[in-house]
Image (spheres, rainbow, N blue to C red):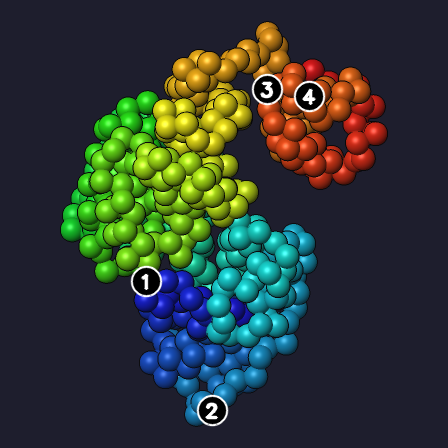
Amino acid sequence: MPSWTRSGPRWAGWSPSGVSRRRQRATSRSSTGAAQLPDTIQSFVAEQAEGIPFLVEEVLAGLIGEGALTERDGNWHAADLVTAAVPATFADAVRRRLDAADADSRQVLGAAAVLGRRFDWALLSPVTGMADAAVVAALRRGVGLQLVAQGALALTAALDLQISAGLNKQFRADEALAAARRSADASRRFHLAVLPMALIFQATAHAIRGEREAMEARIADAISLAPTDQDVLGCAWGHCRATFSLLAGDLGEAHAQMATGAELMLSSPAAIAPPFLGLWPLLGALLDRDAAEGAARVRAARGTRHLVVAALLGYADAILAGRQGRPADADAAFAAAEAQMGPLMAWYRHYARRLAAEAAVADGWGEPAPWLREAAAFFAARGDDRVAAACRGLLRRAGAPVPRRRPGDGELPGQLRALGVTEREADVLRLVAQGLGNREIAERMFLSPRTVEKHVASLLAKTGLRRAQLAGYSAGLDG
């Protein structure tokens, strides 16, 4: 049976950890009904069972059946022990538990059995073709069926932590908060060192949701556990509090909080590079606050190996070039940053566009109006009203039309929501259904034809349809 252990600060591999010897001895005594078991039997069972609770019972039953463990005068006596055959009932017990498992759990456990006793846990996702979250859920169910040693729950705490970090980067606060809470619960149960950071990720999710009191409470909990941890302190300032300030529209306060966080993070021996290390120089470039020096420090600390940080620094380069009267260089830096930003980082992409557009309007470079229209629609759909309002205000400052939504347009049909279609893509779908071409749609929505082309391509990918079929599909939607 597979089991996992933590190796250093990162969850890297597998090894036979499982249930502690003390717990196995307690299980052994309860299985035999004896007050005491010989030390030789307790050690032997612990070695043979390898941390699997129900195998403890099966090994003891096998020893009794073979006469290696006998009861005389109310006490248990052990014969010479060399090895123990796997009891025949064990295979039946495993089979019954596997039959009770769902298909995903069987797939993960089967992959684990094939890969062996020690390997990088991250292999489970590509081997099974399942997402990390599904792998974690399968492992958790395996523990519940006693097919996986309880050390796997410690692994799932670390995986849930990573999942929460990824969801926070996507500003999917509700899901991130749930994952961070699972990680914190398991960390408390197993006394894991990741608990402070699990609390910080909860605080980040509360910041995204605009819940300042809850954010500060989780920060206080994290700092009480790790008062000198520079990563915890740095993320509390640069990630949690600064995110809250950004969404509240207080850019100056956000930059100051990021600067505090960056001082802590850049002097930390750890190698993590949260996105705010890229957002800090970007915001500084807009506010004329030593952005070049900050960007150089982040690059010297190798923060750019994280693509979102590297992309955000690219947007900062664009603003700095525009401020220096080099519009061609600004355009080139902006284009390079756009190409580097991954599709899952949509929030950071649109927020970077919002900041770059403000500078571009002032300094005369780029295409700020299309950036702002797309950003305004994105943030409005998310409910980030203050950020969306800032985008609309910048459009007015640029003298560009500000599109207004018609009453009821914000209602997204359930079928589209289930496919992950955005409200902006839904708007494009309605116009495609009316027979308009990309250029006509672009003029109607104040977008570039290239942007409309991307929205149409996304619609085709998400619906699995051809363009000619979209009109009929749209007509069949509810809402």
Q: CA separation, marks 2 and 3?
A: 80 Å
Question: Against 92, is 328 above or below?
Answer: above
- Label 2: few (<14), some or many (≥20) within 10 Å? few
Q: Which image quadrant: the N terminus?
A: bottom right
| Residue on which disc 1 sits | 9
- Label 3: few (<14), some or many (≥20) within 10 Å? some
Residue in the foreground of this view, choosing between 349 and 398: 398
Residue in the foreground of this view, choosing between 91 and 461: 461
Corner quadrant of residue 103: bottom right
The answer to whether one can see residue 24 in this image is no
Tag 2 or tag 1, which sits nearer the N-term?
A: 1
Q: Secondary structure at mark 4?
A: helix
Residue 177 on image: x %, y %: 41, 37
Question: Against 80, is 262 above or below?
Answer: above
Q: Inspect the image, locate mark 3, and give the three-letter code of the amino acid beneath it.
A: Phe
The label nearer to you, 1 versus 2, is: 1
Mark number, residue 446: 3
Mark number, residue 441: 4
The label nearer to you, 1 versus 4, is: 4
Determine the residue located farthest toward the top in the rendered image.
407
Q: Which image quadrant: the C terminus?
A: top right
Corner quadrant of residue 418: top right
Mark number, residue 82: 2
Q: Inspect the image, locate mark 4, and give the three-letter code of the amino acid beneath it.
A: Ile
